[in-house]
Image (cartoon, rainbow, N blue to C red):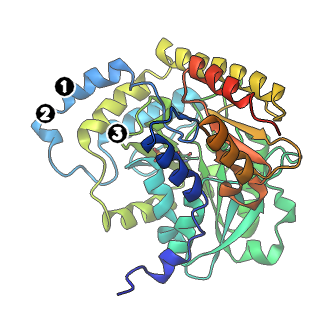
Amino acid sequence: MAVASDRLKALPAYLFAEIDRKKRAALAAGRDVIDFGVGDPDQPTHGFIIDRMAAAIRKPENHTYPLGGGTPAFRRQIAAFFRQRYGVELDPSRELLALIGSKEGIGHLPLAVVNPGQAVLVPSPGYPVYLAGTVFAGGQPYVMELTEAGGWLPDLERIPAEVARNAALMFLNYPNNPTGAVATLEFYERAVAFAKRYNLLIAQDAAYNELYLTDQRPPSILQAPGAREVAIEFHSASKTFNMTGWRIGFAAGNAEALSALAATKANLDSGAFAAVQEAACDAYANIDRPELHRMRELYRGRARILCEGLAKLGFAARPPLATFYVWAGVPAGYDSMTVCNRLLDEASVVGVPGIGFGPTGEGYVRFALNVAAERIQAALQRMAAIRW
Ligand SMILES: Cc1ncc(COP(=O)(O)O)c(C=O)c1O
């Protein structure tokens, strides 16, 4: 019996499968694998959040189905965070929506706002869920190629007018996974003007907005004048507070789009655990705590060690402006899959081949900085033995 749907089969091949298989085989063989593959913090959730969760989980009122769009307290706290961080005033009941992690909202959004056959503008290289959500909804992905020369920003002028006119949605992601690039407010203003011209919705994925590694804090697209008429922004507690397993995030901005997303979700899920929302309130109320500064310092130090080491080995690597990813150009004459295979075979080091993020990711390897400094040094030592 063939059970997989055509939509599932229409997803691009999982290009990390080969590396994944090899990694599992290496681990099973007892090899000491140093894994820069997964974008999942190696540090525990900050203690003050765990303390709040311990109390929240004992409250019976948190044990029932949570309110679909988020508890009033969660929405109020996120509105306060947005005011403090970005100077943007949001209506907690209409312009905010709690999510079971931002991936959930991103994946469901096309079902809420895209009709079959409409175009969705998707960045490449990019987080694979933009494409998957589009394909599941029957949308037509149009790839916006990001290049190093273009600062890893899409060239909006190069999108053909007939594609833009047929587009319902454009995904953006800054700070960017996998490249670590950051967008300026000026870019967001141009994107908002583009969306207004073509009457489409922007979904800007700000999952890494709090992982800034310079003293320039990334803006929110909602700071651009008129943005809430055409844009929503996804945020996540996952990387900000080392809470990937807790599954909590939110979307902010255009009320009509959020209402459509909320209605879609109401048919598919029953909201984020209220105790988690309560703990996340404490997290967002304490966005400037020293723990968070120390976390950025940790990633900054790791990025420095890794990039200096990689540069000596023939990779083109610069510390990211934000995110915990180093996006390194591979040694001349090699493709990203060959490089990752050799790193694993010859040094037991896992990196993600750039081709897995789309064709324009070719020539790069992504290293996630979720590895302790000593282990990064050990990985570099092993990699030094590879002759390119
Ligand atoms: C760019 C980007 N957006 C969203 C997510 C999803 O994060 P979460 O669902 O944990 O909020 C990730 C996770 O890796 C990501 O890299």
Q: Where does the image place residue 198, in percent across and percent down from the top left?
A: 73, 69
Task: Name the residue beneath numbered marker 1.
Answer: 55
Would you say residue 88 is visible in this rendering?
A: yes
* Quarter of the figure that contains the N terminus: bottom left
Q: Left or right: where does residue 352 sit relative to residue 93?
A: right
Q: Position of residue 156 (x, y in %)?
A: 82, 59
* Residue type at numbered disc 3: Trp
Q: Seen in the image, is 41 located left or right of residue 126?
A: left
Instruction: Choose the circle earlier in sequence order: 3 or 2.
Output: 2
Q: Amino acid at mark 1?
A: Ala
The residue that mark 3 highlights is 246
Q: Nearer the viewer, residue 76 or 50?
A: 50
Label 3 beta carbon within 8 A of ligand 1: no
What label sits on residue 59 in the rendered view?
2
Position of the C terminus, as image quadrant, is top right
Closer to the chain start, of discs 3 and 1, is 1
Image coordinates for residue 195, horizontal then vertical, percent: 71, 61
Q: Secondary structure at mark 2?
A: loop
Name the outermost residue toward the left: 60
Who's the residue at 49% across and 83% down the image? Answer: 6
Q: Alpha-carbon neighbours of circle 2 within 10 Å: few (<14), some, or many (≥20)?
A: few
Quarter of the image for residue 154 reads bottom right
Which residue sits at x=83%, y=72%? Answer: 160
Q: In screen coordinates, is 354 left or right of 255?
A: right
